[in-house]
Image (cartoon, helix red, strand yellow):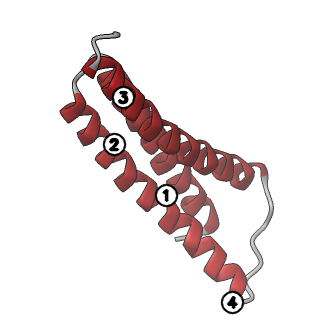
Amino acid sequence: MNDYELEFQLILHAGDARAKAMLAIEEAREGDFEAASDYLKEARGSFKEAHKSQTTLIQAEANGEKNELNVLLVHAQDHLTMALTTLDNAEEFISIYKVLHKNNLI
């Protein structure tokens, strides 16, 4: 797989991870914690796939293959960072929504 294909794979999977994490938050807000957990699991799986693409790029660089710094690579890395942040936030929001629902505050 060439660098562009890896970069697009990274964008695809990171975007999917972020979207699934947002769906997990929405389900938790509605009180469906089982669905939230399922979406969070899917999000983690997608993030893992995105991370594999990033790791391949990093390993190639470590082996002396120069990666061309281009807008697509920067965009891909941005997607990965946003996915990780959204996953972290989703876990926190789900915990908060559990407390709110348990105490009938929502």
Residue 50 image label: 1
First of labels 4, 3 by sequence position: 3
Question: Looking at the image, which is closer to me, 76 or 35?
Answer: 35
Q: Work out whether mark 4 precedes mark 2 in sequence or the reverse, and give the earlier one.
A: 2
Location of residue 59 with respect to 67 vertically, above or below: below
Give the residue number, with chain letter if any, for mark 2.
40
Q: Is residue 11 above or below residue 48?
A: above
Q: How many marks?
A: 4
The residue at 74%/51% (across/down) is: 74
Q: Which residue is mark 4?
A: 63
Quadrant assignment for the C terminus: top left
Q: Amino acid at mark 3?
A: Leu
Quadrant in the picture for residue 4? bottom right
> Can you name the residue that lies furthest to the front here?
103
Residues tagged 3 and 1 counted as in contact (Cβ below 8 A): no
Q: Which residue is mark 3?
A: 23
Report, in whole angstroms, how far the alpha carbon at label 2 lies from the one at label 1. Answer: 15 Å
Closer to the N terminus: mark 2 or mark 1? 2
